[in-house]
Structure formats: C-alpha cells, structure tokens
Image: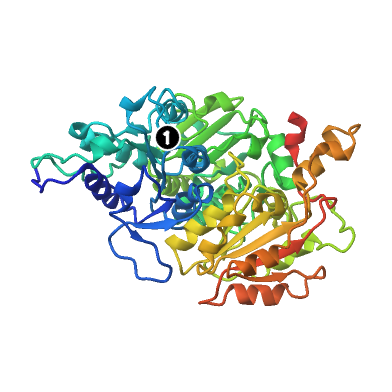
Amino acid sequence: MVVVEPRIGYERLLDAMTEWGVKVCSGVTGGGLVHLLKHMEPYVPHRTRGGQIEFFTIGEYAAGFVPLGHYLATGQIAAAAATTGAASKLLLCGLSDAKLHNIPAVYLIAATPSDMAYQAPLQDSTESGSNMVGQLMAELPHGTFVLDDIDVLDEQLAAAWDRLKQSKPVVLVLPPDALSELTSQASERCMPPRPSVAEHENAATFLQRHLSQRRKGRIVVLAGDEAPRYRDMPYLTSRLCEVLKAPVVWSINGANAVSRDNAYGYGYLGFGGNDRAAELWDSLNEHDLLIAIGFCGDEYTTNFAQPKAGLVWNITANAHFYGSLHGSFRHQVVGEFQQTVGDVEAILRETILWCQAHPHISNEEPPRYTHLNIGARGNRPGNAVDIVAFYEKLDELWQPDSLGFDDVCLAYKDRQYVTQRPHPHARIYSLYRGSAMGGAYGLGLGAKIASPGKHVFVFSGDGCFRLYGGCLIEARQLGLTLFVLDNANYGIVEQGLAKVLPDTPARRYHGELERIDFGAMARACGWSSVRMSPDLSNLGDVMREAYRRDRPSMLVEVPVDSHQVVGPNPRLKNL
C-alpha cells in the first residue's frame, strides 16, 4: 500500500485522470466546476505541455466532441466538463457519439447536492429538477459514477478506468460536498492496473475446423470501424487479401485500415458507398465466408442489409462494442456467426500464415476494378463548384500527416463515393452513428490540440456551421483548416425529400437557410478566409496555405449546389 498525504477529493480525481493519461479538459467554467478547475492551468496553443491537466475553454457543444477528436488523432484519452444546468445537455451530445463509436473519454458533470432536492436550487439537477443522474444512467448505466462518498472514491475511479480500457466513455458526476472532503492518509492511490492481454481462440483451430475442407464459395473481407485502431492494419489487410485472393469492402472509418494500392479493394459500403462494394455485399450467399475485422452492421454502413454469407467470422479485441448483444453480433447476420476475441493484429498474422500453408482454400482470382463506381453521377449545375471535381483534385493534393473529419452534411455522403479509396497521407473519420451536426468542428479541435504537428481538416456544411460558429475565436491560433460547403440549404434533406415526398412542395421540406458571409465571420474571429473559385483554380493555393506552419486557422467557403446529387443515400428506402 502506498501511503500518501491527505488530499481533497478533487485533487484525488485529478491524480487519477493524470494516471489515465488525460492531458486536456475542454468546456466552460461555472459555479459547479470552480473548485475543480482551480487546480488546472489554462490551455495555451504552441506551449510545451507539462504533466498537469490543462483546461481549454470552448463552448460546451464543441467541447463535448474534443475528447473524441483527441483520441482519434493519438489514441490518448481526454476529458470534457460542464457545470450544472443546460451546459450538461450541450456537452453530452459528444458523449452519445463516444458511446456509439466506442471511444474512451471522460465527462465531468457538476451536480446539485442531493439534499437540495425540492428546495428549488438554481440549475436544479436533482430528481426534483432535471434528474440528470437518471438521464445519464439511462444512456450509460454502467459508465456513470456519482462521486458522492469520499470513502469509496478510489474504488469508483478504478471502476471508471476499467470502463475506459474497454473503449467506453465514462461520466463522473461531481457533487461539491464529498469532493471537498479530505481523503484518508492511508488510502491507496488509484493507480490503473496493468492492462491484461485478452485470451483468444487459436485462429488456426478455427480455420482448420471451418476452412480446411472448403470446396466452394468465396471469402470476402470487411474492414469495420474498429480496424483502424491497429497500426499495421493497412499492411495486414493487403496481405490477407493477397493470400486469399479475397475482395475487401470497408466502412467509412474502416477505410483507414485499407491500403489504397490493395488490388482487391471493392470500396466503401452503405451511405455514400461505391457501386462495386454494394454489388459484392448483395451477392453474398450461403456458401461464402465473410471475415470481418471489427464487424460493422449499422444502418449507415449496411442499411440493415444483413450479410447473407453462410459464415461470418468476426475478429475483434472487444466482444462488447456498440451494436453487440450479449457479446456477439449473431443477431445481425443471416448465417452462422463465429468470433475470435484478442489481439487483432496477432490473430491476422496467424491467419495469414495458416492460409499461406493451405493455398487450396483461396478464392479463384476475382475481378479487379480500377473504377469502383458504375457510370457517372452528379452533373454540376449553375456557377457552383463541381463537387466531383473538387474531391478528385483534393485527393491529388494531400500531404503526409493529414487528418480530416467529415461533418453531417453532403461531405459525409459524397467524398467517399468520389474518391473510392483511402489516401495514404490522409486519415479521414466521420462520427456518423449519432450524426450530430457540427460535431466535426469539436473533433478537429481535439485532434489539433492532441497532435499540433498534424494537418487537420474539417469538412462541414452551412447548416452544421450554425452549431459552432460562435466558437471560432477560441481556435484562431490552432492552424485548423475548415471547409464550409455553402448551398444555403440542408442539402441532404433537400436531396432526399425530393424522393421521399415527391408530391410535397419543396418549401415544406423546411431546408432553406439564410445566406451567411462565412469569410467575414472568420476574419472577425482572427481566422484567414478564402472563397473557392467555381473552376477550382485556387484550390492548389488553398492547400499550400493549409500546409504552411505557424499560420492562423483558415476557413474556406465552397459554393455548392444541392441539386448536384453524387453519393447514394440508401437510407431513403427506410423513410
């Protein structure tokens, strides 16, 4: 047992967060947070970071997404904080996406003392007011910890760390009374336990049982959202495909686990997906084996079209990722489902070696495609930018260490359809499961804070902008590049409802937006700005500026037309 000097609960909490690797916390101060935040230094861009947690002041809606971008950029956990009242409602939009995308993050939520229930306190979060704990428990029943007893604080923090190690977000609810008390001198510090290595079924055993006598059917690979978490995955997916002659499809985030030069690539699945990928997925039958590296059967990726393969083998590090039921995705497949849980890279290396020793199980050589779409889509109307040409040219300009985020706008439907394959210099993510408009801005902030040396790009829409436009000033020194697709419309709504409600007048889509001078807003907040020429003649200059070091953040207005329909939206069939 390690004996430590008495410390109040707030200090013990910060000690634990430091031990978890937390270096930054985002949000807005307030009465419920002041006794926590007085222990943090303010975050200052371009300053050498020490060991102490720093506080980045940014509006709560954007702040809630900062830990997610921080993790996607570096794999390191970060935190966000909100005081009592409406602040928590704004911050916790990010919590929902953290849950849906299996991202570990810490949310610190100030609370009204429970003994103030029915006393009408200001910003009442007790059961007589917003009943905040009840709401949190409904969304995160195993990840919400009310720190209201100093004697069990270390036990609660250890339990929270265990959740974080499982790629789950946690909420730490902070009533002020208990956390202001001194902890015992004899208490043991909440040191995180050493991560255990998960045991997994021997891949060779699985392969011997299911494939050694294989005589017919195809093997197809799916790279899901989990796959990019592992550094060597682009190499391993290429080797797996080469050995098995197996075509591979991927989710929008799973693309980051696939090499562009993988000759067996068939493209993105689902929303904004490629025609060859959809064709392959729909053709799966009872004789086929689908090897899923992080099964990904959500609506955006498969549109509820369950794989019809006779056997789905899921390789994962965690049997309880979002969408699973009782530690399995069996309920999301038509045929048999098997799962191996453990070190994903080790399992794949073992699988590749086994398959090399059993060449008879590989597919016959499948068709290879240079172009993953069938036919052309989306002629450019009017004087707007041709969005197809925009993404094609942009794809030629990426430089190393680029990191991008698609917001919930036409960007997260059209980019992947046009580019068809991932780029080796640019990892691009979308938190599509919650589809929180404007969340990509917070992701970009978190990524840039976590890794200042990366070139961070956000692709947002004019509708999304309205949710974070008041937070530009705080990011002026970060060197972020923000593309705003400007069509004075909720573009996805406009495109979709023309098919869903063909007999309804367009005015009743309620998708029109007032024009904003985005450049003027950006410049007023200390950003630079540029408007994209419809002929894209200045895109090269824009990207050269984006890659220049020590510059202010830059907003790029991209005039687009929502009548240019590019990526498919299969979800319309569900509406």
Q: Position of residue 79 (x, y in %)?
A: 39, 49
Residue denoted by label 1: 122
In this rendering, the answer to whether 564 lies above or below 552 is above
**Residue depicted at 34% across the width and 66% down the height:** 49
The colour scheme used here is rainbow
Q: Is residue 324 above or below residue 266?
A: above
The C terminus lies in quadrant: top right
- In the drawing, does residue 220 fall left or right of residue 51? right
**Residue at the spot 15% in from the left edge and 40% down from the top edge:** 183
Q: Secondary structure at mark 1?
A: loop
Determine if residue 93 is in view. yes
Q: Residue 26: where, in percent of width, then height? A: 43, 52
Q: Residue at 26% of width from left, 36% of height from top?
A: 177
In x, y percent, where is residue 372?
A: 74, 52
Tell me the crowding category of disc 1: few under 14, some 14 to 19, or many 20 or more residues within 10 angstroms, Cα based. few
Query: Is 236 positioned to the left or the right of 410 in the image?
Result: left
For residue 556, say whether it is visible.
Answer: no
> Which picture quadrant has residue 32?
top left
- Image coordinates of residue 67 in percent, x first then y, are 44, 50
Question: How many labels were placed on the picture?
Answer: 1
Q: Amino acid at mark 1?
A: Leu
Q: Depth check: 296 or 515 in front?
A: 515
Q: Is residue 284 above or below residue 457?
A: above
Answer with left or right where residue 395 lies relative to residue 31: right
Quadrant in which the N terminus is drawn: top left
